[in-house]
Amino acid sequence: MKWLGPNPRVRFIKLHRGTRVLLGTACYAGNGSNSVPNTPDSVSENRKAGDLLLLEMQEINQWARTAFQLYFGWFALQFTINGLAMGWQFTHQGPVPWFANLTYMVLIGWNLMGTFGTILVYKGLTGFDLRINELTETLAKESIAGDSWAKPKSPIPLSSLSAIFLFCTITMFISLSFWVLLALGGR
């Protein structure tokens, strides 16, 4: 496919089972129609730029849902293990095992990674939201003429997510603090 113009933006997205679609912009000189000339490299002859932007938005939404589900599955596991370890710590009678300090260090490291991981996942989801907002603005320019009430919004609820991720970060930081105090101060 020959790109016309000084600096086209090109982006590949991956669809189902390895199919790759080329996203980009190109201007064709010709008779003034909006049709794309038939080329053997083109993915689809009748595919409009809006269709490709919608495909990218669907792909971003799928990645955001997957990241959200994976993170909260991991958070539930981490919260459960911290709760079980704290419960054992409070109910255990007798001497502390010889490997207790090693266990404390592992839990400290795990909660520290979880705290930073929570921040990184939240930043990733906000990046997804920014890209979806770009795409909806681009699509709205093409299809909606001046109706601000009909402009689509991003499906990622950032205000709710910020509260949830703040709760998760605080929870992991409290667990981290507990294990640090236990490791430094002993039982």
Image: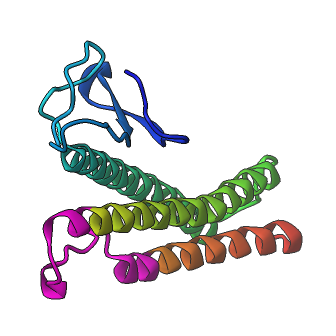
Image coordinates of residue 77 in percent, x first then y, are 45, 53
**Quarter of the image with the N terminus in it:** top left
Residue depicted at x 12% and y 80% = 150
Q: Residue furthest front?
A: 31
- On the question of residue 117 being in view, the answer is yes
Specify whether 176 is left or right of 25. right
Residue 91's place in the image compared with 95, above or below, is below
Specify whether 22 is left or right of 102. left
- On the question of residue 92 being in view, the answer is no
Q: Residue furthest bottom?
A: 149
**Quarter of the image with the C terminus in it:** bottom right
| Residue 124 part of the magenta segment | no
Q: Nearer the viewer, residue 54 or 41?
A: 41
Color encoding of the figure: rainbow
What range is drawn magenta here? 139-164
Q: Residue furthest top?
A: 40
Image coordinates of residue 154 in percent, x first then y, are 28, 70
| Residue 151 part of the magenta segment | yes
Q: How many marks?
A: 0
Image coordinates of residue 29 in percent, x first then y, are 31, 37
Residue 32, located in which quarter of the rendered image?
Answer: top left
Residue 102's place in the image compared with 35, above or below, is below
